Amino acid sequence: MHEYSIVQSLLDIIEDNAKKHNAKKVTKIVVKIGVLSGVEPHLLEIAFNTFKEGTICEEAFFEMIIEPLKVECKECKNVNEIEHNSLLFECPVCKSVDLEVLSGENMYLMSLEME
């Protein structure tokens, strides 16, 4: 499960930020997870709750924002959200499959709340 390595990297980034700001603890973490990022939100939450023990994040609330797949059609230039579980990605307006992915493929650390 690669969510464990993702959480370890996330905790390292959070610890570095907390040290830079002289924080004693982290109270809230917000991440944005794209539907095509390859990250399973449920597994990420389990991994986070497992690995946060004994860290500056031990009492932190972990919030996940699920980012939909957003594409721009290269034919008609419309921007749309597409269901990620569809077998065929096509523009809902002109039915072209010549699409550029604008968002929904990555995971981001959006914010930290620290004391």
Image: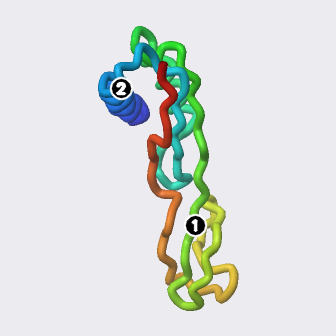
Of residues 97 and 68, the one nearer the viewer is: 68
Dot 1 alpha-carbon crowd within 10 angstroms: few under 14, some 14 to 19, many 20 or more: some
* Residue of label 2: 21
Q: Is residue 84 left or right of residue 6?
A: right
Res 56 quadrant in image: top left
- Please tell me the numbered disc located at residue 60: none
Q: Is residue 9 left or right of residue 43?
A: left
Q: Is residue 79 above or below residue 107?
A: below
What amino acid is found at the position of numbered circle 1 in the picture?
Lys
Q: Is residue 68 above or below residue 26?
A: below
Picture coordinates of residue 38, whole percent (x, y): 46, 48
* Residue of label 1: 70
Picture coordinates of residue 17, whole percent (x, y): 35, 30
Query: Colour scheme used in the picture?
Result: rainbow
- Quadrant of the snapshot with the N terminus: top left
Give the residue drawn at x 64%, y 85%: 95
Q: Secondary structure at mark 1?
A: strand
Picture coordinates of residue 27, whole percent (x, y): 53, 21
Identify the mark nearer the N-term, 2 or 1: 2
In the displayed image of the protein, which residue is found farthest to the top?
54
